Each structure stands twice: as C-alpha cells, then as structure tokens.
Image: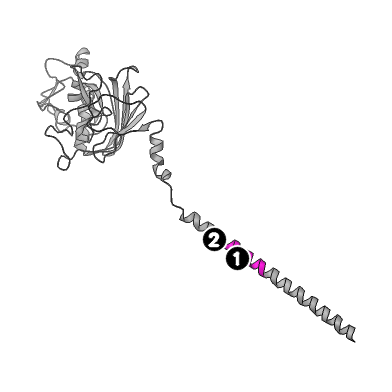
Amino acid sequence: MKKKMNLLILIFTIIFMVGCTNVEDTSSTDAQEITTDTTNINSEKAVVDKPVGEETSTQPNNELFLGHKLIEVDGGDLSGHREPNVVVDIGYGDREYWAFTNEYGQLVRVIADEIILQDDRNEPVLSSGRYYPDEAKVPGVESDVLDEGHIIADSLGGVSNAYNITPQDSTLNRHGDQAYMEDAIRKAGVATNFEAIVTYSNTETQIPSSYQYTYTLKGNKIVDTFDNVNPDEVNASVGLTGSEPSDSTRSNKNADISSVDTNGNGQVTIKEAKAAGYSMPITSDHWLYPYMHDADMDGIVGE
C-alpha cells in the first residue's frame, strides 16, 4: 500500500512539473511577440517623423547650376573680370536673374523666371534712372562705338557688374533691337520665361557677335535675334535707308498691323518694318510710328 501511494505521489509530481513548464513557455512566447510588435511600431514611427533633408529643397538649383560654381559678386563691381564656369545672380534686390559663363569666362546665358521692373519709389534709384553710377569695364567697352550694354537693363531690375554687361554697339543698344526689346517689356509690365543666349566669334574675345532673347509677354512667346552691329550702317549698306522717308505721309492708323508685327506683341521693330517692305526712317506722321519705339523721342525711327 505504501508503495502505491509513493507511485501516485511521483506521478502527480511529474504532471505538475510538466504543466508549469508549458505555462512558462507560453508566457515567454507571448512576451517575445509583444516585444517584436513594439519594435516594429517604433521603427515605422521613426520613418514618418524623419525630417526632410536640405538636399531635397536645393535639388532644382543643383540641376540648374550643373557644371557651374555659384558665386556672389557685388552688383556695382566695375571690374570687367569674369570667372569661368560660374553662375551669378544679377538681379537687383531679391530678384533672381541667373548669369552663366563658359570655360573661357564669356557671358553666354542669362535666365529669369520673371522679369520684375525697377521700382524707383521703393528702391534707391539714382537720378539717371540707374542703380549704380557706372557699369563694369568689360574688355571692349573702351571702344568709341561700343556701350556697356546690359543684358537685363536697370529699368528691368538688372545690376551693373561684368556678369550682366557686354560690349554692345551703341546704336543697337540705344536705338536698335536691344532698346526695343527692353521697351516692350517695360510697356507690358512683366516678362516671364526669360532667356538670353550670347554668342561670340571666337573664344578669346569678350565682344559678342550676336544675341538671342526669348521671353513671354502677355501669353505670347517672343524670340528676338540680332547681330551686335550698327543697324543703321547695315541698312545703308543694303540700300534700305534713303535721304527721304518713304511712305511717311501715308495715313492708315486703323490698319491691321498683324502682317508687320510678326511676333504678335503689338509693337513693330525696325527689322519687322523693313521685312514688310517699309524703308527707314519712319516719321511721326507714318501710320506705323505709334507702334514703334522712338528711343530719343525725336519723331523719327530708324534714322
């Protein structure tokens, strides 16, 4: 009898020990699963809360400036020196007008999302209408027939350092297509998608051979291309300038200028007028005169 009791006690002891072991295993498993779930939740939260790096916000500029080093140059710097393969902001104040040089230090491209006109009421504009008393002395401007020509004029918010100045024919700059282009933007009040491409005859000169301006006025895309030459001399050489104004007395103020105004911006350039068969000069009594830019306000265009 005593042996049977001992056997029963042994069996109950074994059963009790096995049961405790199962409970401990289950508890350990549950604890491990809870710990794993918590780790996953924390990991997901870390990804969501991770701040966006600066690299993302500057990526567009990195692409825009690819191959060029961004440097700062004072807007009134009179030095004519340019660094090669750099990009410079040539917009006055908060304007962003980006100028690019090539490997030879030539100014080859200027772009701006928006051209913002000069504000002489809120900006320190001189009595001359300029931001600075002088312009950068880029090699070539010492010539009597070349101006310190702005790619983006003071009146359009451009500065006067070498990254916005090229030696430009004086007549072209003051009375030609360059002056007309600037006047058209001023009259429109704003221009968008602006790009200037500057071309040179060789890699050693700083005097451009031609310019191409692309910009949008009032929804119209305009492309102006012209050589860096005196337009009056060119006109005379091909017999387009005479001693007497042609068609100067013809009055047709209500006429449709679409056949002359090829870029559709409501203004007529000397080049467009000549292409339509009108010889220069155009005087104030000519029907085209109101649609043309008379830079010196003397009643004659293309003299």
Q: Are marks 2 and 1 in contact (CB under 8 Å)?
A: no
Secondary structure beneath dot 1 equals helix
- 19 in relation to 90, above or below: below
Residue 45 visible, this orientation: yes
Secondary structure beneath dot 2 equals helix
Dot placed on the residue nearer the N-terminal end, 2 or 1: 1
Image coordinates of residue 258 in percent, x first then y, are: 24, 31
Q: Is residue 156 magenta?
A: no
Residue in the image at 73% along x and 71% along y? 21
Quadrant position of the C terminus in the picture: top left
Image coordinates of residue 282 in percent, x first then y, are: 14, 23
Residue in the image at 46% along x and 53% along y? 50
- 86 in relation to 94, above or below: above
Q: Which disc number belongs to residue 181?
A: none
**Of residues 244 and 295, which is closer to you in this image?**
295
Residue that numbered label 2 is attached to: 41
Image coordinates of residue 32 in percent, x first then y, are: 63, 64
Quadrant position of the N terminus in the picture: bottom right
**Of residues 189 and 39, which is closer to you in this image?**
39
Q: Tag 1: residue type?
A: Ile
- Residues at marks 2 and 1, CA–CA distance in whole angstroms: 11 Å
Would you call the spot at circle 1 few (<14 residues within 10 Å), some (14-19), or many (20 or more)? few
Residue 268 visible, this orientation: no
| Horizontal relation, residue 31 to residue 11: left or right | left
- 219 in relation to 5, above or below: above
Q: Quadrant of residue 149?
A: top left
The span shown in magenta is 27-38
- 270 in relation to 2, above or below: above
Residue that numbered label 1 is attached to: 34
| Horizontal relation, residue 290 to residue 30: left or right | left
Residue in the image at 63% along x and 67% along y? 31
